[in-house]
Amino acid sequence: MAMRNPVGRVNYQPNSFGEGPRESPQRGFRSFADAEDGQKVRLRAESFADHYSQARQFFNSQTPPEQRHIAMALTFELSKVETPVIRERMVAHLLNIDEGLAVTVADKLGIKKLPYPADAAVAPRGDLEPSPALSIIENGPDSFEGRKVGVLVSEGTDAALLKKLQSAIETEGATMEVVAPKVGGVEAADGSWIEARHMIDGGPSVLFDAVAVLLSEEGADRLTQEAAARDFVADAFAHLKFIAFVPSAFPLFVKAGVSVDADEGLIPLDGAEGVDAFVQSCRKLRLWAREPAVKL
């Protein structure tokens, strides 16, 4: 039981600062050697000395997007480490897991010369087969049920198309929320009123699993001047989400720097077929193939 909170920059050892906790043979914990048939001792299996094989199997079991995410996460965390030698030491450990992973992380950290692999108490195994059960993407859901779609509308939006989209989304077991320039809503092209759940400033695309942009020509031209509307499209694209759109929304996409022909994740709503194609695509949750185009 901890009796005090240690102070200092580190609370582990070994470390590069020469401070922090140290083993105390006099005051530290010791097992009581109770003589029965033999001494009672505290032992671990030899496999506990293998610090890298499980990590290697886990990494090899991931899909390429997941492996990229692991490299990105390691890079982010190590970029916050102020001492270069500690960053290099971690890359030395990564070399015992996967050389490609270590090279990627080292490059993004600006480490020009790879360190030698860290000393391993037990040589990492190379005979562990990848396990599909360890991959989140490989075991993801096969439907869009429980997810949420954000639909950006404006004055003059096609109300009939919006209703078709809502019906298809709800049939899938998902929900739809309307985002508009004003939270009160907008008047549709047929004169009906469309209630909004969010105003554009408070309903960014990060709140949704997929988005649709159903703007009139006049509405799209007006929203090109709205940073939050441009971000709604640009962020959804950067976050690999599926995006449905109507042709009249093109000006907003151009202003946001997103080409409607960029990939199969941008789906035109050209009637019932377009609506069905969008909902079916959303079952994949993300378009991982887009990631190399939006992240270095």
Image: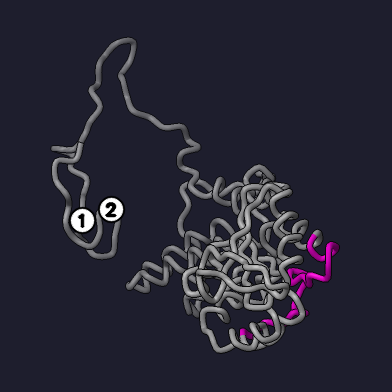
Residue sitting nearer the eye, 212 or 235: 212
| Occupied quadrant, residue 26 | top left
Residue sitting nearer the eye, 296 or 272: 272
Give x and y (percent) for residue 174: 65, 51
- Category of crowding for the residue at label 2, using alpha-carbon neighbours closer than 10 angstroms: few (below 14), some (14–19), many (at least 20): few
What segment carries the magenta color?
Answer: 256-275
Q: Quadrant of the N terminus?
A: top left
Which secondary structure type mostly characterizes the magenta part of the structure? loop
Give x and y (percent) for residue 207: 53, 62
Q: Amino acid at mark 2?
A: Tyr
Residue ID for mark 2: 12
Residue sitting nearer the eye, 47 or 265: 265
| Occupied quadrant, residue 38 | top left
Q: Is residue 266 magenta?
A: yes
**Residue sitting at 73 percent across and 72 percent down?**
190
Residue ID for mark 1: 20
Residue 12 located left or right of residue 177: left
Give x and y (percent) for residue 232: 57, 74
Residue farthest toward the right in the current orientation of the protein: 273
- The label shown at residue 183 is none
**Residue sitting at 75 percent across and 75 percent down?**
246
Element assignment for label 2: loop
Evaluate if marks 2 and 1 touch, with contact meaning CB atoms under 8 Å apart. Answer: yes
| Residue 213 to residue 217: above or below | above
- Report if residue 81 is visible in the image: yes
| Residue 292 to residue 136: above or below | below
